[in-house]
């Protein structure tokens, strides 16, 4: 089989029809398969999905559900020579798979290909960052990872053991990217639109709370823990450098405290540290206010940095099991090859 499209979904009843219609239409061209991996949805997602000629796979245990584990569970059932990863709130765009397949077949050292992800609405800072990246992509570019989904060569995945680290609440595409690159594979992003994305209807604060509650923030620390001592350790650190922002600035404050204690007659280190912290973060707030032209935006950034810093530490302290442990799943219908 040439192609498997793996779709991860949880309570996507409003979007799953658009997602599946586009995926089935594209898979039909290659006699491929569409596998919906359902994380035990409580809405009509599965009932709607049953209307389409696809395979539906579910987790057996709720504790196993997650973004990365959904990808890996789909991989356990997939037969395709190439694997496309898609979210249930995404709509694959006509013709992109043909471009991606042609590129992979013409470049045997490339493990995966993605394109532009376009959000259907821009509501949060994350949406804005993705929109800017998409607008800036004007030529074929080698990238660190294929965030937002992409088409992978099965041969490349088999060479590194597994598709997605099943225990990570997030960062699975970043983790996959460094493992592939450490093994000599390349990842490419094409300047064509690959998918339309309809994300959560939320503001920045709601997004921050959701990421904390779901432990997706903690995934950065867990990701670094899994990479520690591996050949891709420094690649991993380079990928997530931005989550170190608050920790780095606190380190600057501590250095200023040490210098102040050495070169002044102040004997109260707590007072010196408080002054240093005030100096550092006041400067950061001023710079961010000028850059963002918004005091509230600057203060939110400071809050966000601290949330990620705390989550980074907590995540790094979390024990992570082997990603090679198989996931218990069940198939809800018979396999169907589109032809």
Image (cartoon, rainbow, N blue to C red):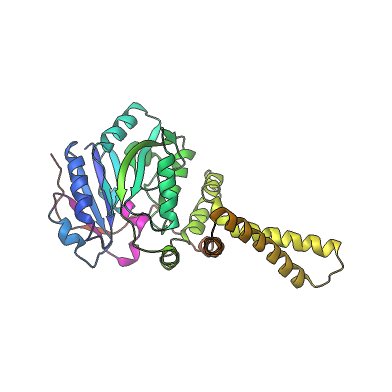
Residue 309 visible, this angle: no
Q: Which residues are magenta?
A: 52-71
The residue positioned farthest toward the front in the image shown = 293
From the viewer's side, name the closer residue of 80 and 210.
210
The residue positioned farthest toward the top in the image shown = 106
* Residue 97 falls left or right of residue 203: left
The image quadrant that residue 185 belongs to is top left
Residue shown at the point (17%, 42%) measured from the top left: 25
Residue 324 visible, this angle: yes
Q: Measured from the top left, where is residue 242 in percent x and y?
A: 55, 53
Q: Is residue 232 above or below residue 327?
A: above
Quadrant of image for the N terminus:
top left
Quadrant of image for the C terminus:
top left
From the viewer's side, name the closer residue of 322 and 314.
314
Residue shown at the point (19%, 36%) measured from the top left: 30
From the viewer's side, name the closer residue of 115 and 311.
115
Q: How many marks?
A: 0
The question of residue 61 being in magenta is answered with yes
Q: Measured from the top left, where is residue 311 in percent x and y?
A: 52, 64
The image quadrant that residue 102 belongs to is top left
Q: Measured from the top left, where is residue 260 in percent x and y?
A: 80, 63
From the viewer's side, name the closer residue of 1 and 133.
133
């Amino acid at each position: 089989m040439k192609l498997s499209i793996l779709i991860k979904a949880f309570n996507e009843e409003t979007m799953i029809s658009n997602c599946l219609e586009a995926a089935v239409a594209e898979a039909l061209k290659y006699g491929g398969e569409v596998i919906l991996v359902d994380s035990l949805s409580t809405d009509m997602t599965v009932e709607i999905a049953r209307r389409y000629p696809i395979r539906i796979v579910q987790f057996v245990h709720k504790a196993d559900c997650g973004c990365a584990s959904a990808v890996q569970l789909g991989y356990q059932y997939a037969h395709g020579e190439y694997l496309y990863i898609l979210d249930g709130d995404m709509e694959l765009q006509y013709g992109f798979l043909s471009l991606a397949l042609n590129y992979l077949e013409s470049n045997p050292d490339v493990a995966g290909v993605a394109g532009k992800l376009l959000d259907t609405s821009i509501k949060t800072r994350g949406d804005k960052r993705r929109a800017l990246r998409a607008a800036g992509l004007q030529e074929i570019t080698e990238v660190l990872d294929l965030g937002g989904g992409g088409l992978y060569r099965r041969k490349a995945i088999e060479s590194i053991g597994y598709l997605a680290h099943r225990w990570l609440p997030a960062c699975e595409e970043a983790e996959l990217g460094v493992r592939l690159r450490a093994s000599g594979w390349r990842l490419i992003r094409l300047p064509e639109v690959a998918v339309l994305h309809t994300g959560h209807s939320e503001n920045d604060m709601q997004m921050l709370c959701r990421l904390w509650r779901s432990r997706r923030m903690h995934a950065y620390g867990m990701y670094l823990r899994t990479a520690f001592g591996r050949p891709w350790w420094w690649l991993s650190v380079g990928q997530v450098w931005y989550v170190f922002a608050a920790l780095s600035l606190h380190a600057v404050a501590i250095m200023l405290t040490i210098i102040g204690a050495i070169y002044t007659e102040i004997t109260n280190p707590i007072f010196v540290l408080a002054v240093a912290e005030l100096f550092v973060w006041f400067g950061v707030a001023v710079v961010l206010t000028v850059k963002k032209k918004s005091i509230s935006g600057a203060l939110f950034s400071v809050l966000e940095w601290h949330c990620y810093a705390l989550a980074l530490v907590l995540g790094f302290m979390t024990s992570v099991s082997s990603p090679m442990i198989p996931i218990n799943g069940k198939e809800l219908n018979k396999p169907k090859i589109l032809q």
